């Protein structure tokens, strides 16, 4: 059972304790049946105001109550042609972003891209059209300007965005979908995702690519018309091969506290969302959520309180009618006729 008070908890609970203490003191001084009924009314009203509830059999959060962050790898390796046969990995990422958004209609979406650095391409918005448009124009980074990609390049930016979302709407669960291949080409080792990970309520790390790998075309010239294959100088200028690193992706998933799911083809994304469902978000932070996915119990206590109040009102009305000289039993005075004023009856 969890509680969602009708006012902020730091105000509600102290007031509730004071009222209960006062009620207990009154009962200690006077244990009449009337005092017990009034004490029961106070307790029932406090319980109703505390909004008790149980997690439902299906505690999924309404999608319109979600903040969804897409963190997308757009390093040159995202052009590797080993997704669903010989398609670029980024094509799979784009399809999955749109598919996840379709499964979570009405949510607020944010799009963050990264290679050697991270960029917020789309702040949180309910504009699904903007998300689709920006997703469609995503393109792999240039191999000529790349300074080496890091799988943790978005760690700091993501942490800042999560904190800002919590500050703006603390009751909204925050889902993170990290899309990449796990390939680390930066000279330094990847940093850990630590900042803001405690604010993540669900999501998944989605991995793209194969162990055999794929060749990458260069997008230095035009995002619409990729150039020739990137060459590996250390291998006699043959086309370079990029391979998925699922161990690194699993490590990222562990740090973000979400499941890792390999995406080799555009299969139904709903199967991948089973483990990433926001159901866990509703259960994990039920004391802060707005009640989605809960069986509300406050109405039981409110109904019982109404019954006690009605009973007390009936008893009070009956007492007033029986009260000697009371308003309900005292006869109204009659007015004497003007024609009889001053008359004296004859003896």
Image: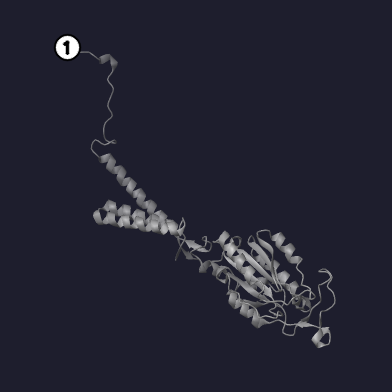
| Label 1: element kind | loop
Residue 300 visible somewhere in the drawing: no
Q: Is residue 125 above or below residue 243?
A: above
Q: Is residue 326 visible?
A: yes
Q: Looking at the picture, how far across and down is residue 6, in whole percent?
A: 46, 55
Residue 8 location, x and y as percent? 47, 57
The answer to which quarter of the image holds residue 174 is bottom right
Seen at 27% across and 27% down, the residue is: 333
Q: In the figure, residue 177 lies in which quadrant?
A: bottom right
Q: Residue at x 32, y 57 (%)?
A: 21
Position of the C terminus by quadrant: top left
Q: Is residue 268 above or below residue 171?
A: below
Along the line of sight, which residue is nearer the eye, 265 or 252?
252
User: Residue 307 appears at what percent x and percent y?
Assistant: 37, 52
Residue shown at 24% from the left, 54% from the top: 29
Name of the residue lying farthest toward the bottom = 235
Left or right of 28: which side holds 80? right
Determine the residue positioned at 84% across, 85% down. Answer: 237
Mark 1 nearby-residue class (10 Å; few <14, some 14–19, many ≥20): few
Q: Is residue 2 left or right of residue 325?
A: right
- Compared with 34, 64 (above or below) is below
Give the x, y percent position of residue 181. Answer: 70, 78
The residue under label 1 is 346
């Amino acid at each position: 059972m969890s509680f969602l008070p009708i006012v902020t908890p730091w105000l509600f609970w102290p007031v509730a304790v004071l009222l209960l203490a006062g009620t207990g003191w009154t009962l200690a001084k006077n244990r009449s049946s009337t005092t017990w009924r009034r004490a029961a009314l106070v307790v029932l009203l406090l319980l109703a105001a505390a909004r008790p509830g149980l997690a439902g059999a299906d505690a999924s959060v309404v999608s319109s109550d979600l903040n969804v962050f897409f963190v997308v790898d757009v390093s040159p390796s995202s052009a590797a042609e080993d997704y669903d046969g010989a398609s670029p990995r980024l094509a799979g990422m784009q399809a999955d972003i749109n598919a996840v958004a379709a499964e979570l209609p009405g949510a607020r979406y944010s799009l963050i891209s990264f290679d050697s650095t991270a960029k917020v391409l789309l702040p949180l918005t309910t504009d699904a059209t903007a998300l689709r448009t920006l997703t469609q124009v995503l393109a792999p980074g240039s191999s000529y300007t790349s300074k080496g990609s890091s799988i943790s390049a978005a760690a700091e930016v993501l942490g800042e965005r999560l904190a800002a979302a919590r500050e703006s709407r603390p009751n909204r669960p925050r889902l993170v979908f990290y899309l990449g291949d796990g390939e680390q080409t930066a000279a330094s080792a990847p940093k850990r995702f630590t900042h803001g990970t405690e604010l993540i309520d669900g999501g998944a790390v989605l991995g793209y690519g194969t162990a055999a790998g794929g060749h990458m075309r260069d997008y230095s010239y035009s995002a619409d018309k990729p150039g020739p294959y990137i060459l590996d100088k250390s291998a006699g200028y043959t086309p370079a091969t990029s391979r998925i690193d699922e161990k690194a992706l699993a490590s990222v998933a562990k740090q973000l506290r979400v499941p890792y799911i390999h995406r080799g083809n555009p299969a139904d994304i709903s199967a991948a969302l089973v483990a990433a469902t926001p159901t866990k978000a509703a259960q994990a932070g039920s004391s802060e959520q707005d009640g989605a996915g809960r069986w509300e119990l406050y109405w039981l206590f409110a109904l019982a309180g109404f019954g006690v109040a009605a009973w007390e009102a009936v008893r009070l009305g009956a007492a007033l009618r029986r009260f000697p000289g009371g308003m309900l039993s005292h006869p109204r005075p009659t007015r004497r006729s003007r024609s009889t004023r001053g008359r004296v009856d004859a003896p």
